[in-house]
């Protein structure tokens, strides 16, 4: 289980569909889900409005609909509690993955927007890639959550966890090792090659979960295009495909996809221009330097 936090500065948010919210609110904080399925995400928010602004004004934003005022303050300094339907491409994708959720406390305020999600690493990579296509975050941070042996929310499946724990208890990861792969295979009743393959896979999963970065997640061109298609279908179903703010967002995503493809093509062309002779010469120089240093 991983947790990833994205942060965008206010001045950059003004250039996408989130920008108009700053004309209505001082702060909006996500508190909890009430219902969470694709195309129908209902959440409770705490909202501080600008002077003279009201909850009804949020309905002008294509991605928000006020369903119920749960608490109306008696003084301006207090917040509203609102039940709202959320219909934005990023949380919609979050709901569709089935393996990630938004963390309470995610908010938009005078500094910018903080969006924290938890879930499986593979699911979070997809969301990270989509977030970057919409507007590259100013900051991204990630941490691992709850890797307890008794938890089913870690990166390993139960059987993988059992094998890893057995290998650890038997001293396979001691320095020096107290047992060999052969000893482990006899203990669990599996072929030596099978145990070796499983342990290699377990180690790769743990290393990836601990050290994988979410600040530069690149999606394949076909993945990016499928995402855009799904966003446009949802927008058509919900009848806001012609909304000016939505068009601004989808155009930005297309521009970023085009820039990504151009960058990838340039990199590929650059690699193609390197001949085998150049590679061999570079390796020769590298080996000579290492030999002299030793």
Image (tube, rainbow, N blue to C red):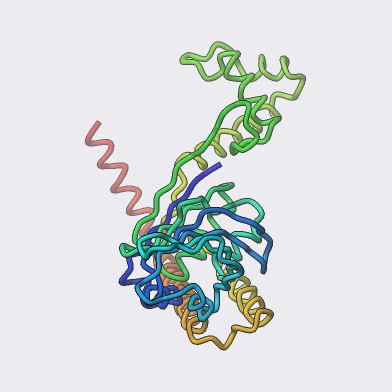
Residue at x-position 47% and y-position 69%: 133
Question: Which of 3/22 is in front?
Answer: 22
Q: Is residue 65 visible?
A: yes
Q: Is residue 262 visible?
A: no
Which residue of the protein is positioned furthest toward the left in this rendering?
Answer: 293
Residue 84 spot, x, y in % from top left: 58, 66
Question: Which of 19/5 is in front?
Answer: 19
Residue at x-position 39% and y-position 59%: 78
Question: Which of 194/215 is in front?
Answer: 215
Q: Quadrant of the N terminus?
A: top right
Which residue of the protein is positioned furthest toward the front in this rendering?
Answer: 74
Residue at x-position 37% and y-position 65%: 76
- Relative to 138, 202 lies left or right: right
- Relative to 97, 90 lies left or right: left
Question: Which of 207/36 is in front?
Answer: 36
- Relative to 2, 42 lies left or right: right
Q: Quadrant of the C terminus?
A: top left
Residue at x-position 57% and y-position 71%: 66
């Amino acid at each position: 289980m991983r947790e990833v936090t994205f942060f965008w500065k206010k001045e950059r948010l003004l250039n996408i569909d989130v920008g108009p919210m700053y004309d209505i609110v001082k702060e909006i904080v996500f508190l909890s889900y009430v219902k969470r399925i694709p195309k129908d995400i209902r959440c409770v928010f705490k909202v501080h409005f600008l002077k003279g602004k009201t909850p009804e004004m949020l309905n002008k934003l294509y991605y928000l609909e006020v369903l119920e005022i749960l608490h109306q303050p008696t003084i301006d300094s207090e917040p509203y509690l609102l039940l709202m339907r959320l219909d934005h491409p990023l949380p919609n994708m979050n709901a569709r993955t089935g393996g990630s959720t938004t963390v309470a406390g995610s908010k938009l305020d005078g500094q910018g927007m903080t969006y924290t999600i938890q879930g499986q690493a593979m699911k979070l990579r997809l969301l990270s890639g989509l977030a970057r296509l919409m507007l590259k975050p100013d900051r991204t941070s990630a941490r691992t959550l709850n890797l307890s042996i008794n938890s089913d929310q870690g990166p390993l499946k139960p059987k993988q966890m059992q094998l890893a724990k057995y290998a650890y208890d038997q001293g396979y990861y001691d320095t020096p090792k107290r047992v060999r792969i052969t000893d482990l295979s006899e203990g669990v009743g599996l072929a030596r090659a099978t145990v070796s393959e499983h342990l290699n896979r377990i180690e790769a999963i743990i290393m990836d979960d601990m050290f994988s970065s979410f600040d530069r997640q690149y999606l394949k061109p076909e993945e990016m295009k499928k995402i855009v298609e799904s966003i446009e279908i949802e927008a058509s179903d919900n009848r806001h495909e012609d909304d000016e703010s939505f068009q601004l967002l989808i155009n930005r995503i297309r521009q970023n996809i085009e820039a990504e493809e151009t960058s990838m093509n340039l990199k590929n062309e650059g690699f193609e221009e390197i001949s085998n002779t150049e590679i061999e010469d570079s390796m020769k120089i590298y080996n000579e330097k290492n030999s002299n240093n030793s």
